[in-house]
Image (spheres, rainbow, N blue to C red):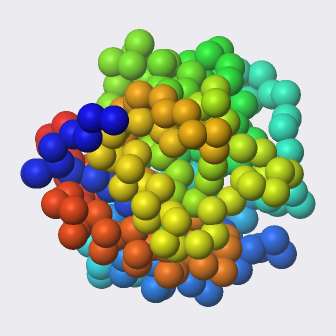
């Protein structure tokens, strides 16, 4: 396998935050915000509320972390992980409403929302459905052409963003395994999650160095990688985040917020 030279290469670490609900604790959010570069903030539809949004934004501002909206289906009962069939106009309203909720709170703190990353079932569906992916992309571009669309690498979402010539960043998942088709292994399967920080840091570094997905089978799929997503919803999240960040820096990568990466300036 040919490894890329990664001197002066930029990378971003993002995390879904402010997801306080009956399904999820946000107690690690302040600690994670000292490690990551960009925060995807729940906007109240699958988790979170004005208090959690305000908390994440204040700490993000203090730590120089860029702020992104993490919109979902309006489904707090299922943490936004149940698929829904909505019209294009309903999807558009869903995204705009959640962006505006977060942007209002960001503005009150002297900050701005600089990226959008869909959550849960909405994200999973758009990865597979070019029509939905295009609706999301058009909506985000119409809100503000300078918004960065954070998408899973190799997905229909990336295809839609590229076709619309919009700003987009491609992410990989630090704590998830991949199937041979490039999709994430279902959470219903026993090998879906990578919970060992040592394993996660090796998993991430190999993907970044080779610019390819590591599939659970051993297969590698070439792809673009701008950002590494760390989930905050498992007990090893903090240790994993620290381990990955230290390993990336030790191997010559420069960590940046999404909106400060050279490709967007």
Compared to residue 223, the image places residue 94 above or below, namely: below
Q: Residue at x 48, y 46 (%)?
A: 172
Q: Is residue 220 left or right of residue 98?
A: left
The residue furthest left is 8
The C terminus - image quarter: top left
Location of residue 166 (image quadrant): top left
Q: Position of residue 97 (x, y in %)?
A: 61, 45
Q: Is any atom of residue 147 visible in this view?
A: no
The N terminus - image quarter: top left
Q: Is residue 152 left or right of residue 78?
A: left
Q: Residue at x 15, y 43 (%)?
A: 5
Q: Residue at x 81, y 28 (%)?
A: 86
Along the viewing direction, whichever of 190 and 69 lies nearer the viewer = 190
The residue furthest front is 1
Q: Is any atom of residue 89 visible in this view?
A: yes
Q: Position of residue 137 (x, y in %)?
A: 50, 26
User: Disc count in the image?
Assistant: 0
The residue furthest right is 77
Q: Is residue 88 left or right of residue 149?
A: right
Along the viewing direction, whichever of 71 and 197 lies nearer the viewer = 197
Q: Residue at x 43, y 55 (%)?
A: 204
Q: Position of residue 260 (x, y in %)?
A: 20, 52
Along the viewing direction, whichever of 262 and 42 lies nearer the viewer = 262
Q: Is residue 210 left or right of residue 25?
A: left
Q: Position of residue 164 (x, y in %)?
A: 40, 16
Compared to residue 212, the image places residue 257 above or below, namely: below
Location of residue 212 (image quadrant): top left
Compared to residue 136, the image places residue 256 above or below, namely: below
Location of residue 43 (image quadrant): bottom right
């Amino acid at each position: 396998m040919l490894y890329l030279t990664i001197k002066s290469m930029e990378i971003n670490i993002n995390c879904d935050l402010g997801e306080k609900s009956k399904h999820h604790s946000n107690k690690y959010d302040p600690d994670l915000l000292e490690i990551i570069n960009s925060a995807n903030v729940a906007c109240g539809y699958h988790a979170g509320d004005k208090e959690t949004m305000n908390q994440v934004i204040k700490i993000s501002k203090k730590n120089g972390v860029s702020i992104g909206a993490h919109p979902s289906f309006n489904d707090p009962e299922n943490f936004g992980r149940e698929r829904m069939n909505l019209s294009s106009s309903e999807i558009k309203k869903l995204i705009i409403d959640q962006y505006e909720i977060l942007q209002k709170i960001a503005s009150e703190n002297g900050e701005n929302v600089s990226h959008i990353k869909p959550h849960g079932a909405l994200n999973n569906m758009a990865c597979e459905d070019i029509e939905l992916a295009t609706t999301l992309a058009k909506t985000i571009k119409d809100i503000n052409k300078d918004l960065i669309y954070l998408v899973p690498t190799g997905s229909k979402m990336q295809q839609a963003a590229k076709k619309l010539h919009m700003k987009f960043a491609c992410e990989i998942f630090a704590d998830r395994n991949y199937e041979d088709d490039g999709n994430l292994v279902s959470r219903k399967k026993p090998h879906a999650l990578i919970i060992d920080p040592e394993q996660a840091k090796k998993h991430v570094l190999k993907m970044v160095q080779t610019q390819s997905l590591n599939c659970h089978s051993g297969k590698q799929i070439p792809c673009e990688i701008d950002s590494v997503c760390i989930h905050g919803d498992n007990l090893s999240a903090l240790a994993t985040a620290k381990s990955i960040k230290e390993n990336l820096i030790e191997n010559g990568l420069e960590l940046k917020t999404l909106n400060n990466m050279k490709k967007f300036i």
